[in-house]
Every structure is written in structure tokens, then in C-alpha cells.
Image (cartoon, grey):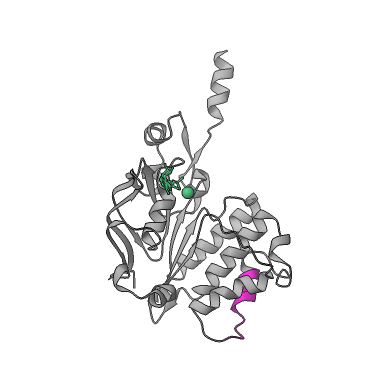
């Protein structure tokens, strides 16, 4: 059954700063929803409002229920959150970190899920390594393994669970970007919901079903990648010319910001 994660008229003030204003959108299970927008447009704040980490006006509904009416353990059973960055101050092994995801979701202490989750992010064999000794990209994938461990099965009794990810591929090489985006797509294809803040517009075009473009704390555009990733919309939102192209036959939009440089070289 398709269910939704909905933001209704979300407003957030941080200090005297009105960071979000009147934000509305609906993400559907079975789809990958990408939130994009310039630095400081409010993407992280929106995710933090949706996960209850920051006080907000308006309402967030998950699978039809007001998030404010759910207990933390009920929420933890239906959605897992990967923050934009997580620092860990104590010497934990990779497996210890990933197993933190178990406490919220599954109960079996001897579950094989953490090892499967590590393999799914390309970290089979890393279980015994010290987290602090890993590269930034490896640490980021350990965090994703922890998050996916929490909601390993995308459907529970037919009800979708949700992955909420803030820039999950930010420090990954292109091969691991695809690993992670394939994982997100697979999760949605098996009935779960995925909402991810994305920095890379080409990856967004390739992997997202729905795009929410943020600008100045508001939703500037929403729709399919082809609807949102247009020359006019991107030039207006990002403040520079970004020619959008499509590759036949799939009609997947792709972007060449460097065309700007080429144009000025030709002009000179
Ligand atoms: N604690 C805070 N107090 C005041 N302003 C903040 C605070 N946290 C974030 N902001 C501001 O809110 C805006 C949105 O931040 P953020 O949601 O992190 O943006 P994004 O994730 O889109 O880059 C930025 O202008 C940022 O400076
Ligand atoms: Mg952010």
C-alpha cells in the first residue's frame, strides 16, 4: 500500500532567523524523493523538523499519523535518520556502531542484519575495524549501514518504513555514490519510502522519482526531475546559468555547469 510522509505548513525559527516558512510537500512510499537547493536553503532544517529534532510550526505526518502523537519508539520502528554528519567520540568498532541500529528496530541480539547492512554499503569485512581509523567516506557508509539496519525490511505487515537521509553520498567516490543510490532505489522498489537531501543534481536526475527544490526556506518547485530541473528554474534558484540537457532515449536530464566556462572561453 502506498503511504506518505507529509510536511504541512512547516515553519522554523532559529534565534531571530526564520529558516523555514510554509513548507508543504508529500513524499510517497515506493519512490525516492530528493530535496535539493542551494547551501543554506533550509534542507537540513527541514529534515530536522520532520524528524522532530527542531521545534517547528505546522504538522508532519508519517503513514497517516501525526508525528507529534507518536512515541519515540514507535517512530524509531518506522523511520531511520542519517544526519548530515555524525561524530563519535569513543573508540567503537564498526560492528558496534552498526548494531546501534538494532536497538530501535529488531529485537534479536544475534541478528545477522548488521553484517548484511555492511555488505550492502560495500563494507563487508570491515566489522572489526575501529570506526575512527576509517576514511570519511567509509565512516559515512558505516552510518548508512546503521540507519538501514534500523529499518532493514522496507515493509512490516504491509506498512512502509522510511529512510530519511541528509546528503548520504556527500563524501563518497562515484562508484560508492552509485552503491548508495542503488540501495535507496532498491529500498523504494521493495515498498519503503526514501527522502534524501541531495547535493548532486545529476545523481538526483538519475535516481529520484520526485524532486523538491528549496530556496530561501521555501519550496521553489516540486515534481519529477524533468519538471524541476529546468534551465529557468535552476538559473533562478542557484543564481548562475546551468544548461540542462537530456540523453535520449531515456530522457534523463543531465547538467553541465562547466559549459559556463566553455562559453566564456569561446567568447574571449
Ligand atoms: N542554530 C541556528 N541559528 C540560526 N540560524 C541557523 C541555525 N542553524 C541553521 N541556521 C541557518 O538556517 C539556514 C538553513 O540552514 P540548513 O537547513 O542547514 O541549510 P542547508 O541544509 O540547505 O544547507 C542557513 O541560513 C543557516 O545559516
Ligand atoms: Mg544541509
Q: What percent of the width, then of the height, locates residue 203?
A: 52, 48
Q: What residue sits 74% from the left and 68% below the top?
A: 129
Magenta: main secondary structure equals: helix
In front: 15, or 217? 15
| Magenta segment | 109-119
In front: 130, or 32? 130
Report which quarter residue 227 is drawn in.
top left
Q: What percent of the width, then of the height, locates residue 177?
A: 60, 54
Check residue 30 for magenta coloring: no
Q: What percent of the width, then of the height, locates residue 42?
A: 40, 47
In front: 258, or 5? 5
Q: What residue sits 46% from the left and 71% below the top?
A: 190
Is 78 drawn above or below residue 135 in the view shown?
Answer: below
Q: What percent of the width, then of the height, locates residue 26?
A: 31, 58
Is 173 drawn above or below residue 179 in the view shown?
Answer: above
Is 6 drawn above or below residue 213 in the view shown?
Answer: below
Is 96 drawn above or below residue 60 in the view shown?
Answer: below
Q: How many marks?
A: 0
Q: Quadrant of the C terminus?
A: top right
In the rendered image, the residue lying farthest to the front is 15
Tell whether 108 sits left or right of 23. right
Tell whether 32 sits left or right of 182. left
Check residue 111 for magenta coloring: yes
Q: What residue sits 56% from the left and 30% below the top?
A: 258
Tell whether 230 sits left or right of 65. right
Report which quarter residue 241 is drawn in.
top left
Tell whether 49 sits left or right of 120. left
Amino acid at each position: 500500500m502506498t503511504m506518505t510522509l507529509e510536511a504541512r505548513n512547516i515553519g522554523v525559527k532559529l534565534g531571530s532567523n526564520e529558516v523555514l516558512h510554509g513548507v508543504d510537500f508529500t513524499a510517497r512510499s515506493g519512490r525516492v524523493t530528493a530535496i535539493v537547493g542551494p547551501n543554506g536553503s533550509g534542507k537540513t532544517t527541514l529534515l530536522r523538523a520532520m524528524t522532530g529534532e527542531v521545534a517547528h510550526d505546522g504538522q508532519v505526518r508519517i503513514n497517516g499519523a501525526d508525528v507529534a502523537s507518536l512515541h519515540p519508539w514507535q517512530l524509531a520502528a518506522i523511520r531511520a535518520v542519517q544526519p548530515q554528519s555524525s561524530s563519535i567520540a569513543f573508540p567503537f568498532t564498526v560492528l558496534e556502531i552498526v548494531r546501534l541500529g538494532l536497538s530501535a528496530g529488531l529485537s534479536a541480539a544475534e541478528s545477522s542484519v548488521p553484517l548484511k547492512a555492511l555488505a550492502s554499503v560495500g563494507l563487508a569485512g570491515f566489522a572489526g575495524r575501529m570506526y575512527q581509523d576509517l576514511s570519511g567516506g567509509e565512516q559515512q557508509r558505516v552510518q548508512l549501514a546503521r540507519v538501514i539496519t534500523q529499518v532493514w525490511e522496507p515493509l512490516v505487515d504491509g506498512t512502509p518504513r522510511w529512510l530519511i537521509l541528509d546528503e548520504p553520498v556527500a563524501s563518497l567516490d562515484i562508484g560508492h555514490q552509485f552503491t548508495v543510490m542503488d540501495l535507496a532505489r532498491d529500498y523504494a522498489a521493495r515498498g519503503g519510502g526514501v527522502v534524501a537531501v541531495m547535493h548532486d543534481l545529476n545523481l538526483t536526475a538519475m535516481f529520484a522519482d520526485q524532486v523538491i527544490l528549496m530556496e530561501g526556506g521555501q519550496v521553489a518547485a516540486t515534481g519529477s526531475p524533468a519538471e524541476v530541473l529546468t534551465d529557468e528554474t535552476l538559473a533562478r534558484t542557484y543564481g548562475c546559468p546551468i544548461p540542462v540537457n537530456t540523453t535520449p532515449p531515456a530522457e534523463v536530464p543531465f547538467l553541465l555547469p562547466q559549459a559556463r566556462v566553455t562559453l566564456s572561453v569561446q567568447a574571449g
